[in-house]
Image (spheres, rainbow, N blue to C red):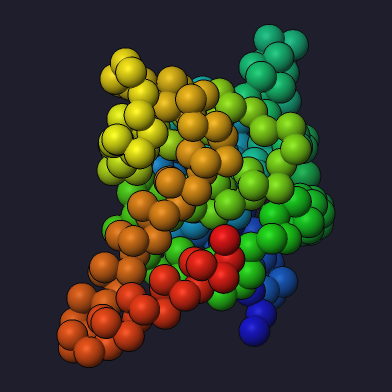
Amino acid sequence: MVVKHRVAVLMHDVGRAVELAELLEKRSAIAVLTTSSDELYQALNRNPIDLIVIEQGLAGFLTGVEILERLFSDLLRPTTLLLGELSKEEQRRVEAIGVQRVLAPESSPEQIVSTIQQLLRSAAHEADVISPAARHIVQRADYIQPLPQLLVKLVTYLRDDNLDVTRLVRDISTDPLIAADLLRHANSSAVARRQPTTKISDAVNYLGARKAIGVAISTGMLRARGALLGDLPPSLHQWHSSRAVLTACTAA
């Protein structure tokens, strides 16, 4: 099965954006064209986006860097390619939010697509633990809020020897249900903590990063399972539950 990467595009010149999208389609990618920061935000919420292409000079009030700063303060951080000439201050801000690559605004569509492919190959190498089938399931699960790629992101943390706990806390905090379940687990009788935990950061530090990730993934998968199995007969529910327990015991 060929896995098609999703690339969100926000550019000032619509014609140039369409040309880029057509070239991406020829390279087995799915281009998601957006015309504003709101549409880009919605695209990130609807589907797992592998890469963002955004221009610095846009028609609205916000620049590309300003849009990225606002997105990255609230959401997970997909690989990003920025097109534009930047001042020293803008370069500092771009480095601070972790933009992977900056190209000149006059770069040709072929140069842009070539850079996109390089960035996607690099990102795929870092996240090779995730199978295409798992990505497909998460992509369909639009009831996992606020971003379908939250569970995908959490899985990649399990192979990160230099895990950034601050980033992990921020990512878990984007999903109220997962955050609430983590706090409930940290305050359960099984953990037997003397003082109640009210902050996600405290729960992660007390449980440990890997345990916290396990709880978060478990919550997300239970929610996904409930939605996927909602219309099945009780006999299949029972079979699936038994199989899930056996799989969990084997994995443990």
Q: Position of residue 6 (x, y in %)?
A: 57, 61
Who's the residue at 58% across and 66% down the image? Answer: 251
Q: Is residue 224 above or below residue 157?
A: below
Residue 226: x %, y % from top left:
26, 68
| 230 left or right, relative to 185 | left
- Residue at 68 percent of width and 10 percent of height: 89
| Rendered position, 142 above or below 119 | below
Of 211 and 146, the residue lying toward us: 211
- Give the side of residue 114 with respect to residue 49, left or right: right
In this picture, residue 65 sits left or right of residue 201: right
Task: Check the picture and name the quadrant holding the N terminus.
Answer: bottom right
* Residue situated furthest top in the rendering: 89
* Residue in front for this viewpoint, 1 or 166: 166
| Residue 108 visible, this angle | no
Q: Look at the image and tell me in which quarter the C terminus lies.
A: bottom right
Judge by depth and name the residue closer to the eye, 226 or 190: 190
Asked where in the image residue 162 lies, by quadrant, the reply is top right
What percent of the width, then of the height, locates residue 234? 18, 85
**Residue 131: in sight, yes or no?**
yes
Q: Is residue 218 or residue 65 the one in the foreground?
A: 218
Coordinates of residue 250 in the picture (x, y in percent): 57, 70
Dividing the picture into quadrants, the one containing residue 50 is: bottom right
Q: Quadrant of residue 19?
A: bottom right
Indicate whether 134 appears above or below 94: below
How many tags in the picture?
0
